Image: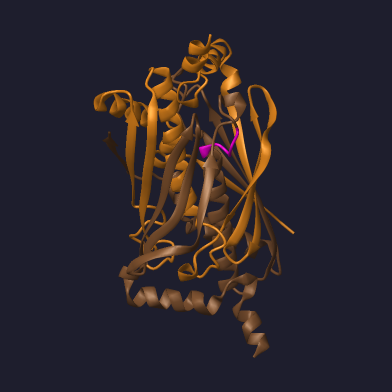
Chain colours: A brown, B orange
Amino acid sequence: MTGTVTESARNGVDTATLFATLDAVKAAPQAAKFQFRADNEWLSGTHNRSTIHGFYGVGEERTHERTFQFDADHPAVLVGRDNGPTPVEYVLHALAACLTAGLANIAAARGVRLTEVRSTVSGDIDLNGILGLNPDVRNGYQNITVQFSVKGDAPAEKLREIVEQSQARSAVYDVITNQVPVTIQVTTG
Amino acid sequence: MTGTVTESARNGVDTATLFATLDAVKAAPQAAKFQFRADNEWLSGTHNRSTIHGFYGVGEERTHERTFQFDADHPAVLVGRDNGPTPVEYVLHALAACLTAGLANIAAARGVRLTEVRSTVSGDIDLNGILGLNPDVRNGYQNITVQFSVKGDAPAEKLREIVEQSQARSAVYDVITNQVPVTIQVTTG
């Protein structure tokens, strides 16, 4: 059964479990309701740290196998101490990661073996917005470009279709290109 | 001059440099054009890694003092191996980090000394969207909530105003609540 096992783990994706998960959610759509969280603590200046551990999904509270922590800061040129990337750089990482994970899953489901996937995500931002110096300039990225290099055992056309499907099903792509309502609550003292 | 130095570094923010930067950008608006980037490499399955190092700003190519790398993955319940947070969790971290950095800067500029800033960001997502099981369900977060706890040497009303101003000037808040155009280019073979 070695062949079957290898086939089942194409691209490192356990397609048998992937399809079983799809069937399980079809049978019980409520299982697909997830809540993700990040806890952040201010350290000094623009330096702060998020902790990611617990989340809710498939009907119960869960935790990642490890606790993940990430520092964010501004570089010196933006009056920080460069203890981590800027928050907006984490957004670019999230987009690349989401599209790439989807690509691997979709390729596996379509029987395509990938050999290499690389991407560079770049975002243009004009700080006249967040500095409050020009009301016509938005605070966030004006545009974002993703450059993918994809190699695998399928024709170029099929590889492109897999990227298109990943884009069509990406959570982070949706968050960035469409609007998500955000509510901010404040407790003081 | 100790008093002045302390005052100048309120909240760990070098306000003298912050105001000098504002004046410099006022005098030369082109200096505020930045480009941030993340390079991502697929590892296996939903596991991939981004590298963040170079960026463009204030008229030239620059680099962070260190090279930052971050792994993303899915937990086992989402057919991954939990080598890192999910891409959508990084988005929550980015939002918390951006609002918190802004809060520290704005408080410093307004003469408010902060003693503690904590936040929990949570995002609700229904995976019937990205699994392609329900066309009425979006791929991304349906809503995001930020709960801030802010303490400092100012009345509650003033602390709330600082959070509001941080929201009004946050790059990541803008990216999430408004639309950013994303272009995806693909090279194969």
Please state if A100 lies on the left or on the right of A52 as rendered: right
Residue drawn 50% across the image and 21% down it: A128
Please state if A156 lies on the left or on the right of B18 as rendered: right
Task: Report how many numbered discs are placed on residues in the image.
Answer: 0
Farthest residue in the front direction?
B2
Q: Is residue B112 visible?
A: yes
Looking at the picture, does residue A9 appear above or below residue A102? below
Residue drawn 32% across the image and 75% down it: A28
Queried whether the magenta region covers residue B14, the answer comes back as no
Residue nearest the observer in this picture, B4 or A32:
B4
State the image quarter where residue A162 is shown.
Answer: bottom right
Farthest residue in the right direction?
B189
Residue drawn 47% across the image and 62% down it: A64
Q: Is residue A148 visible?
A: no
Please state if A63 lies on the left or on the right of B18 as rendered: left
Looking at the picture, does residue B160 appear above or below residue B182? above
Tell me residue B28's x, y (percent).
58, 13
Queried whether the magenta region covers residue A83, the answer comes back as yes
Residue nearest the observer in this picture, B123 or B136:
B123
Residue drawn 45% across the image and 28% down it: A138
Tell me residue B119's x, y (percent).
37, 42
Q: Which residues are magenta?
A: A82-87
State the image quarter where residue B155 is shown.
Answer: top left
Looking at the picture, does residue B28 appear above or below residue A123? above
**From the image, which quarter does the C terminus of chain B lie in?**
bottom right
Residue nearest the observer in this picture, B99 or A98:
B99
**Secondary structure mostly taken by the magenta-highlighted segment of the chain:** loop
Tell me residue B96's x, y (percent).
42, 41
